[in-house]
Image: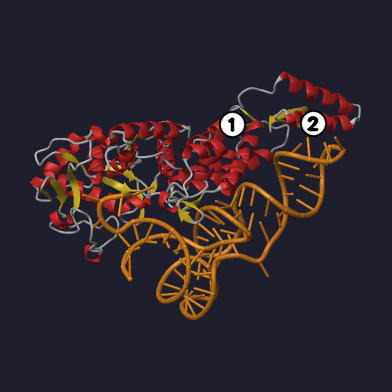
Amino acid sequence: MRQIRLHDTHTGALAPLEPRDPGRVGIYACGPTVYNRIHIGNARPFVVYSLLKRFLEHEGYAVTLVANITDVNDKIYDAARPLGVPSQELADRMAAHYRADTDGLGLGRPDHEPLASEYVDAMVDLIGTLIERDAAYAVEGDVYFRVRSDPGYGGLSHRLIEDMDQGEGGDGLSRKEDPLDFALWKAQKPGEDTAWETPWGRGRPGWHIECSAMAEQLLGVGFEIHGGGNDLTFPHHENEAAQTRCGRGAELARIWMHNGMLQLGGEKMAKSVGNIALLPDVLREHGRDAVVMLFCGGHYRGPLQLDDGTLADAAARVRRVREAGRRLTDGASPAWSAALKEEFFAALAEDFNSPRALAAVFDWVRAANSSPADAAVGGADLHEMLDVLGLANLLEDEAGGPPEAVVALAEARVAARSAKDFAESDRLREEIAAAGWTVRDVAAGYELVPA
RNA sequence: GGCGACGUGGCGGAGUGGCUACGCAGCGGCCUGCAAAGCCGUGUACCCGAGUUCGAAUCUCGGCGUCGCCUCCA
């Protein structure tokens, strides 16, 4: 098995992937809080971890990908209230949108998509243990995590407790022993319509404990990869790590991966900046191929420019691959392919360097295009590479050939050309174009491709 | 202010102490009746300053700039 290395936020270095159980890899990727439609920025982790799973499977691992859906959260209450609908109803509706929108990416579903509301028992259990171990305390129906009880706290995000801004504010401040402490459980407040009974009162879970509990339930403590956007490193992942460390006496995950933010106009895409683009809108305008190609074009850890220009670039790359695919035959690839295929997978093995892998794809395309016209080039290797990136469909024939009428026009054009009636030939080409097709003159006669 | 990341050719975006990233766009050529697609060629790219080195865009230090996070708020 090829050695795979991934960047671990905790150590700040590349770490070899060494599964807890040989041959098996668990990935937990923090998903969205469903209080509105997701924007294209939210799609990046979905794509990154879906593709990482494909790569690991290609390398022979049995992979379980868990991407949670946070459906109990302050933001949901805040969004539901003005709409006059129960918060759970809003969450359900937005979760359905989320599934439909991400389905549009054509990358399948994660193996598990747990809803926080369905794992409250596990959260209550973990909180109970934390209280028993003096890592947490209940106050007036709230439960807080005692940050200073965890010597490892701050390690993931490389922050010193002493450096942390002793921020004011927060209505829980007066009940906390220490301003650093964060909520594991929150007593139900007026206007909050979802709550569960617990030994310390009626209420609902804090955000961080949700992920600790769901990840543990589905993957067990000490699984391989925990991922999410780099804006979640602190406090969310720091707190998640602390909860499991103190409650279970073991690290939740071996490697903490963080993907970079999408940039729109040089800034993080966020509602507060007013620069959001909804995922379904982008998919409709540019197509899922372009979106996936764009995401693959930048390293997952870095920021990535997303705008009409970069999407158009990505669409052009898609066309180039698809164009090359038209000339390929089924079956094994030529000898020259092996080295490029190796480059491709080696790039992914080294911190999932998809842009470098993509460079190998385009080198492959150029080699194939350069092959003598009479030499059939088998597309098997290219298909294998693109499949890992979720782009194998580029090699498949577009649905449906040209309509009869267009074929007739093309035939008429052949006749016109052989009669050297180029005016008529050009007129027919325009007519074909108006019908949505491009006619090309090739050695064998002509070729019709969708415009 | 603190912590972290980053500043690469027109644009996007990799990478390495000395050797072509890749793609898009542009320019020249081949092919074509003309195109399209493809192929070939082409751009004195690495924020600024100093240092280390035979040699740095790649290492070190300083500066400037950008981005993310800074605790119930992705």
Q: The residue tagged with tag 2: helix, strand or loop?
A: helix
Q: Residues within 10 Å of mark 1 (few under 14, many from 20)?
A: many
Badge number at residue A447? none
Query: Which amino acid type corresponds to the residue marked 1 in the rendered image?
Result: Leu
Residue A302 in picture, x, y percent from top left = 45, 53
Report the side of A38 relative to A142 (left or right).
right
Label located before the other in sequence (1 or 2): 1
Badge number at residue A395? 1
Q: Mark 2 belongs to which subunit?
A: A
Residue A151 in picture, x, y percent from top left = 17, 58
Residue A105 in picture, x, y percent from top left = 48, 35
Q: Residues within 10 Å of mark 2 (few under 14, many from 20)?
A: many
Q: Which residue is mark 2?
A: A429
Q: In this rendering, is residue A13 above or below B18?
A: above
User: Which quadrant would residue A150 be assigned to in this image?
Assistant: bottom left
Report the residue at 43% width, 31% height from top: A100
The answer to whether residue A18 of the structure is visible from this angle is no
For the C terminus of chain A, which image quadrant? top right
Query: Which amino acid type corresponds to the residue marked 2 in the rendered image?
Result: Arg
Q: How is the image coloured?
A: secondary structure
Query: Mark 2 and mark 1 in contact (Cβ < 8 Å)?
Result: no
Report the residue at 63% width, 22% height from top: A400
Report the side of A385 relative to A436 (left or right).
left
Residues at discs 1 and 2 both on one chain: yes
Q: Mark 1 belongs to which subunit?
A: A
